[in-house]
Structures are given as structure tokens and as C-alpha cells.
Amino acid sequence: VSLLVVDIGGTKVSSAWWRRGQLSQVRTRPMARDEAGFVTLLQDLHRDYPHARQLGVAVTGRAVAGVVRAVNAAMIGFWNGYPLAARMAGVGLPPPLLLNDAQAAAWGEFRADADADDGRPSGEEGRGAGAGDEALEGRRDLLFVTLSTGVGGGLVLGGRLQSGAAGLAGHIGHVGTALRAVDGDQACSCGRRNCLETVASGTALARQGRHVLGRECTAQEVLALAQSGDAALQQVVAVAAAAVAQALADARALTGVARVRLGGGLGLAPMMFDAIERALRELPPLFVPVLEPARLGAHAGLIGVGWWAEAHGVDVVREA
Ligand code: BMX
Ligand code: ZN
């Protein structure tokens, strides 16, 4: 094995050897807070996987020609215009193929379905011929949404991963929401106002929790306290879930996508997942996609970028 896969998120960095969709030697470390710390992290990576010959990297932010550019500039201080490919080469890692983290996860989820379908007897796709065609057609499209430090998204349409000009496609965290956070209108550090990410990300839940409780708290704490009956925090969760549901309906209206996978530490939390399902049931069925938890769980990005790197070659630095 020699393909190393890395997933660099706002809060943590995961890495593993990748072979045909299987991961081994999975490691997770906290994301560095500054550039110097990040270079140390890259050196540690190189030490942990010294025989890496190929490298696929899923990364928070847009990845363009070896450089990462934040959409939300406040998420990681040094991440806007960071020459990631050059820094990786600088510590002796192979030249990486870079892909946005949620786009990578979307590709991983899509590929996981394709593999599962391979093992199925044919004709199982639906009863009537018409219904079967529609079901089959629908399986070529998939939206992945992660609720984590930020809110990320990746879209596969017609069997193709959409990365868009400048890697922006799928950034559902930065669509506007008509719902308001409990602490009022929010400026998003992407330059827009009241983005989904300012209402429904882990960062947004923690911020609203602080507003309600008058002290620091985490998104997981907000969920736990809401679960145990705190009405104000239940409202925070309900508004976040409704905002996500609206954005999924918007995505369906715009692209026709009928299947959504939800991932990220917050998205995979049962309370959040259930709240979003409930909010979807309030919407007209035409706009409601089928929602499922990410089948690859927290490793969707790692596995997805592995498939992507395998298919696209990783011997040159390239635009994802
Ligand atoms: C932000 C944006 C997206 C990313 C999403 C989820 C940056 C740095 N990131 O909207 O590119 O996909 O967060 O990222 O602008 P995560 O770190 O929470 O997984
Ligand atoms: Zn934004």
C-alpha cells in the first residue's frame, strides 16, 4: 500500500492508508491553529506514513491548483491562499491531489452505493419498468452535506462529481437562509449574511449556546442540554434543523437531487438527524429528498478522496 489519504477539516485532521476503498492505520489529530503548527503536523504525517508514494487530500475550503482558499475566512486563520501542495512537498510528502472535503465525501458516498449495487441481483431497482427507470436515474445523483465545524456540501449529478469553477460547487453552507439564529442576524465570514453555516454548523450551535447560557459551550453540549429538556436550546436545534431542511429543498428544486447523505460530527448526531427529518416532513413532498446518514460515517472524505486520487492519477499537482 502506498496511497496516503488525508482529510483536513476545521477542527481535526484524519489520515490513513487507502487501498481499494479500505482504510488502514487511521489516525486523527487536532487541526493546527497556526502555520508553524501546521507544518509540524505535516512533518508528523510524513513520519507516520514514511512510505507514502501517492497522496490524496480532502480539504476544508476550495482547492485550486495546489492552493487552498477559504470560503469562510474566519474558520482557519492562515487558510486563505495557503500553498498546501508546496508545503506538503516541502516536508517530503508526495505531491497531493487536492479536493474539497465535502466534495470528496460526496464522491465516497456515491462510490459506496455503486459498490453495493454491484452485489445486487439485477431487476431489484423497482417494480414497474417506469418506476425502475426513475429509481435508476435517481441513483446517478447524490448530495452529501456535512454539519461539522462549518456546513459543507458536495454534489454528484449524472454520475459526475461537480466541483465547479474554482471549486465552489456544492458549498451549501453559504446559501442564505430565511431563518434567524437565536442571536439574530449574522454576518458570515464569506461576505454574505445569514448563511446556513451561521445557523446550523457546530460553530453556530456553540455560538448560540453561549448566547443562551451566558458561558462557553460546545455544539455537542447544546444537543445534550436540549435533549434533557432545555427549551431555549431545543429552539436553537429546531431552527438549525429547519434551516438545513429548507436548504435541502432548495437544492432539490435547483438540481432535482433526490438523495441526500448527512455527515459530520453534528450531522451524524441522532438528535440533529431526527430534527432535520422532522423538519423535512413539514415541507411539500415534491421538494423533499430521501435523507440518510453517511454510510461511510466519519470516513467518507478519506475514502472518497482515495477513489478520486486513484481515478485521476496523483503524480502531478492538479486542480481538483
Ligand atoms: C466551510 C468551507 C467549506 C467546507 C465546510 C465544511 C472553508 C475553510 N470551508 O463552509 O469548504 O467544506 O466549511 O468544512 O471555507 P469542515 O471543516 O467543517 O468539515
Ligand atoms: Zn457564508
Image (spheres, helix red, strand yellow):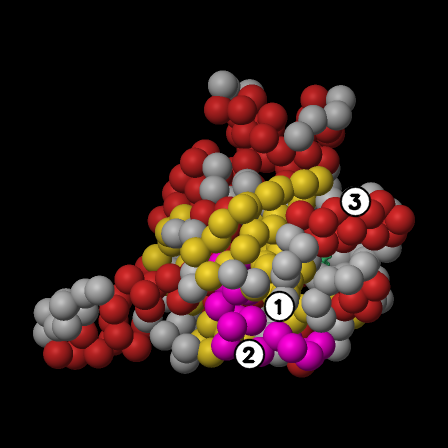
Q: Position of residue 24 (x, y in %)?
A: 49, 49
Residue receiving disc 3: 32
Say what amino acid the circle numbered 3 marks.
Ala
Residue drawn at x 71%, y 70% is 95
Q: Quadrant of ligand 1?
A: bottom right
Say what amino acid the circle numbered 2 marks.
His
The total number of labels drawn is 3
- For the magenta stretch, what is the residue range? 302-320
Crowding near pointer 3: few (<14 within 10 Å), some, many (20+)? some
Residue receiving disc 2: 312
In the foreground, 242 or 40 = 40
Q: Earlier in the sequence, mark 2 or mark 1?
A: 1
Query: Is 318 in the magenta?
Result: yes
Q: Is residue 287 left or right of residue 302?
A: left
Q: Earlier in the sequence, mark 2 or mark 3?
A: 3
Q: Earlier in the sequence, mark 1 or mark 3?
A: 3
Q: Is residue 41 left or right of residue 53?
A: right
Residue receiving disc 1: 54
Q: CA distance from mark 1 to mark 3?
A: 23 Å
| Camera-nearest label, 1 or 3 | 1
